[in-house]
């Protein structure tokens, strides 16, 4: 007897969104999540607990490319990593779906174009109640509809920052955000960026995707259920081996959706190798685990010693003037967006700056994220050493990122911020992980087809960021959700017919 008509592994943005879209079909859907639900706690709004003590970081070790252990900060909860995300729900630019020449190389493009994705972006924005506006960003691709909610308002210091950027000829625009700002602030005067959502103020995979799915009696969520491997019969996936409450059991199903995140999905496919698939499942192309990407990121702090930034959340503005061009030879550089407001404890937890100086800097800084595209490289990959994950992330397109940070610093000084500090993010936290089971039309060079169905196994779909052929230079959450909705429609039409 089958455990369900569909088993979905993982309840992050891809798995939860797909579950919400399949739920009205009436098919029995079982979502397996290795973590638990996050409950409200004092630590959820405590920057020292989150950033200094790592209260929510799992006690987990991966290996880097040199075989050195590190703690990746990969979260396991209902809702996945989206419980801690910055809630930026932004579309890839239309140009991102075609090959683009960067300083570090040329991207491969996608097997589908922006027109194929646009209706699903529109549906994902409606589902996740995105706050935004059109007409401010010259790189914004065409929309078939409008945002259902106005943008989250700028706080006074950020309204001033926006005007200063406009005065030097730049085009700041409102970040598209999945945040109910009133509800978020009702539960604490903190930013939401990297803070866990335990109050429902963020539109994340649990508060939206899972919530919609679980309104239907045919959908079940099982937490504390860790999938150990996928099982095969011939060329099909016959079920999963799952560990729950200290017991290991096998669950049969005719359809599997893998949505455990780019690293964990690749590790699960590789770790499910058997006699018929000695290099892992869905891996005839030898592409599983390869082409890992995670963006090149730097924090940039713009200060004026006589102006204070009293913002609570700050994260409402972006700048795409250098997204499609601006580098040597007109090469693209990337996206600029505000971070959640940095406080003294946050800054002191991640730098050697003494606490009093960190507090002064935080009171006077506008805190910015510079993000450049990470290019696919087959040697940048996830592998297994025994049962342990090895993540060998190869740096790419770094010259473009350095050029973006340099250009941004120049513009910020021109806008009236005489002190500009920057620091690259560490490479231990794969927060924008993608690319390890790439989408493509050719089974010899890709893992899934344009509808996210595995080339090698007709009843296996993958709907997390692992399928992204390119990382672009935008937060991936909305693209993951849009792809999941597109895949769900394909499943309803072809597999549930």
Image: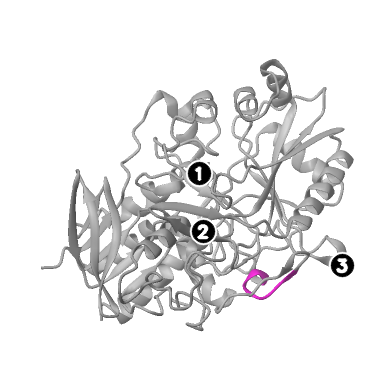
Q: Is residue 224 above or below residue 278?
A: above
Q: Position of residue 285 (x, y in %)?
A: 48, 78
Magenta span of residues = 95-101
Helix, strand or loop at label 1? It is loop
**Label 3 SS:** helix
Q: Is residue 323 left or right of residue 28?
A: right
Q: Is 350 placed left or right of 200 in the picture?
A: right
Q: Which residue is mark 2?
A: 478
Mark toward the viewer: 1 or 3: 1
Tally the numbered discs: 3
Residue at which label 3 appears: 329
Q: Position of residue 274 (x, y in %)?
A: 31, 70
Q: Pointer 3 and pointer 2: residues touching (CB < 8 Å)?
A: no
Please tell me which of labels 2 and 1 falls first in the chain.
1
> At 25% from the left edge and 67% from the top edge, which residue is drawn?
6
| Up-down relation of residue 142 to residue 135 (above or below) | below
Residue 203 appearing in the image: no
Report how far apart the C-alphas of labels 2 and 1 lie in the structure.
23 Å
**Quick one: 88 or 420, which is closer to the camera?**
420
Task: Name the residue rendered at 44%, 57% in the picture.
Answer: 384
Q: Earlier in the sequence, mark 3 or mark 2?
A: 3
Calculate the distance from the C-alpha at mark 1 to the C-alpha at mark 3: 36 Å
Asked if one can make out residue 117 in the rendered structure from this viewpoint, the answer is yes
Whether residue 386 is situated above or below residue 236 in the rendered picture: above
Front-lying residue, 286 or 332:
286
Residue on which the image places disc 1: 72
Which is closer to the viewer, label 3 or label 2? 3
């Amino acid at each position: 007897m089958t455990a369900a008509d569909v088993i979905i592994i993982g309840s992050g943005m891809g798995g939860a969104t797909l579950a919400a879209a399949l739920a009205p079909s009436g098919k029995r859907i079982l979502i397996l999540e290795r973590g638990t639900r996050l409950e409200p706690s004092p630590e959820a709004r405590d920057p020292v607990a989150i950033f200094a003590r790592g209260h929510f970081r799992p006690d987990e070790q991966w290996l880097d490319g040199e075989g050195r252990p590190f703690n990746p900060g990969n979260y396991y909860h209902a809702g996945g990593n989206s419980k801690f995300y910055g809630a930026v729900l932004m579309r890839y630019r239309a140009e991102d779906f075609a090959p683009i020449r960067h300083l570090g190389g040329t991207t491969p493009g996608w097997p589908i174009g922006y027109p194929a994705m646009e209706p699903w972006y529109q549906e994902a924005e409606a589902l996740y109640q995105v706050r935004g506006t059109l007409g401010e960003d010259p790189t914004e691709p065409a929309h078939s509809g409008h945002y259902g909610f106005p943008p989250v308002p700028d706080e006074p210091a950020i309204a001033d920052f926006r005007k200063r950027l406009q005065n030097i000829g730049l085009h700041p625009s409102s970040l598209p955000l999945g945040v109910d700002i009133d509800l978020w602030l009702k539960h604490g005067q903190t930013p939401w960026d990297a803070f866990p959502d335990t109050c429902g103020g963020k539109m994340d995979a649990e508060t939206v995707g899972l919530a919609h799915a679980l309104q239907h009696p045919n959908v079940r969520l099982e937490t504390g259920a860790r999938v150990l491997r996928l099982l095969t019969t011939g060329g099909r996936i016959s079920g999963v081996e799952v560990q729950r409450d200290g017991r290991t059991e096998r669950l049969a199903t005719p359809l599997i959706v893998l949505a455990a995140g780019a690293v964990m999905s690749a590790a699960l496919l590789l770790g499910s190798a058997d006699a018929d698939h000695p290099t892992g499942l869905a891996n005839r192309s030898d592409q599983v685990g390869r082409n890992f990407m995670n963006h090149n990121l730097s924090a940039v702090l713009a200060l004026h010693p006589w102006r204070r930034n009293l913002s609570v959340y700050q994260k409402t503005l972006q700048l795409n003037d250098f997204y499609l061009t601006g580098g040597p030879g007109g090469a693209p550089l990337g996206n600029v967006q505000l971070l959640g407001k940095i406080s003294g404890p946050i800054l002191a937890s991640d730098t050697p700056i003494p606490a009093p100086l960190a507090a002064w800097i935080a009171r006077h800084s506008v805190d910015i994220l510079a993000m450049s595209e990470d290019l696919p490289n087959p040697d940048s990959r996830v592998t297994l050493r025994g049962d342990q994950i090895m993540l060998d992330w190869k740096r790419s397109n770094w010259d473009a990122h350095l050029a973006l940070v340099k250009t941004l610093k120049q513009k910020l000084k021109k806008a009236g911020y005489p002190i500009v500090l920057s620091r690259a993010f560490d490479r231990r936290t794969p927060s924008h992980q993608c690319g390890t089971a790439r989408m493509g039309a050719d089974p010899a060079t890709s893992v899934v087809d344009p509808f996210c169905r595995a080339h090698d196994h007709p009843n296996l779909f993958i709907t997390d960021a692992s399928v992204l052929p390119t990382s672009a230079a935008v937060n991936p959450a909305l693209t993951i959700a849009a792809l999941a909705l597109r895949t769900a429609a394909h499943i309803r039409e072809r597999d549930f017919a």
